[in-house]
Image (spheres, grey):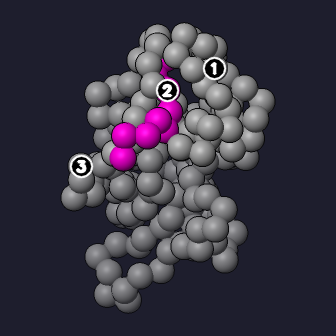
Amino acid sequence: EGTWGLHPGDTVGMDSTPELLAGTCRQFLFSPDGDIEGLLLTLQGRTVQIVLPPGIGAEVTRLTTPGKRFRLLVHPQGGAADAVHPLYAFDSFVDSSGKPTKSPGAEEIKAMIAGIHLGITGAPNGVITVSGEIILVGEAGMETTGLKLNGKVRAVGHSRVTLLGQRLMIARQINGIDL
């Protein structure tokens, strides 16, 4: 943990040592669902495309915007020999010394439970906090953790920002219980 980007089990570009790129965000790239799935980066007059892993696009917009310079670690992804520009898989942002930054997505939420989140089958699969944050644990996680309305929750997991600006967490741990 500590960096974010490609996750264990991802194979895209992972057979190489991460490469440091420093450039200017040119524009975000969107999936058919409207999620940010990549960005174009301009460095030294050339354009490269950075592929982002699912779920971090909204966090990326908090760290960079078109026209802003930033630094990141990437893995060459390859692609077609006649590609318009090089393609890289995102690994992590880096600080001014070139070291990977801590994941803004790996977080902790401590809160009171104001509501129960139901999945599409109607079974409880998470909770809604008094501040409107959504913590998803899955149906089995609800049974294992015993989360209840008006109870307290301490969740650790990967967060993202929804299209409406609220935080949504996929929990890895609830009240000290690993999921």
State the residue in front, 103 or 132.
Answer: 132
Q: Secondary structure at mark 3?
A: loop
The quadrant where residue 85 appears: bottom left
- Would you place residue 121 above or below residue 51 in this image? above
Give the magenta part as a residue range. Answer: 121-129
Question: Which residue does the numbered mark 1 point to in the structure image?
Answer: 153
- Amino acid type, callout 2: Val
Residue 39 image point, x, y percent: 36, 54
Give the class, few, some or many, for how many residues have Cα within 10 Å of label 1's Cα (few <14, many ≥20): many
Task: Specify the amino acid type for callout 1.
Answer: Val
> For the residue marked with disc 3, what is the amino acid?
Gly
Q: Residues within 10 Å of mark 2 (few under 14, many from 20)?
A: many
- Estimate the spatial distance between the alpha carbons at disc 2 and disc 3, rounded to whole Å: 25 Å
Tell which circle, 2 or 1, labels the residue nearer the N-terminal end: 2
Q: Which residue is mark 2?
A: 127
Q: What's the magenta bit mostly, secondary-structure-wise?
A: strand
Mark 2 near mark 1, Cβ–Cβ under 8 Å? yes
Lower sequence index among marks 2 and 3:
3
- Residue 4: horizontal and vertical position, in percent? 61, 48
Q: In front: mark 3 or mark 1?
A: 1
Q: Nearer the viewer, residue 93 or 111?
A: 111
Asked if residue 125 lies in the magenta stretch, the reply is yes
Q: Which mark is residue 164?
A: none
Residue 67 shown left or right of residue 90 in the figure: left
Determine which residue is flagged by label 3: 34
- Left or right position of 145 against 65: right
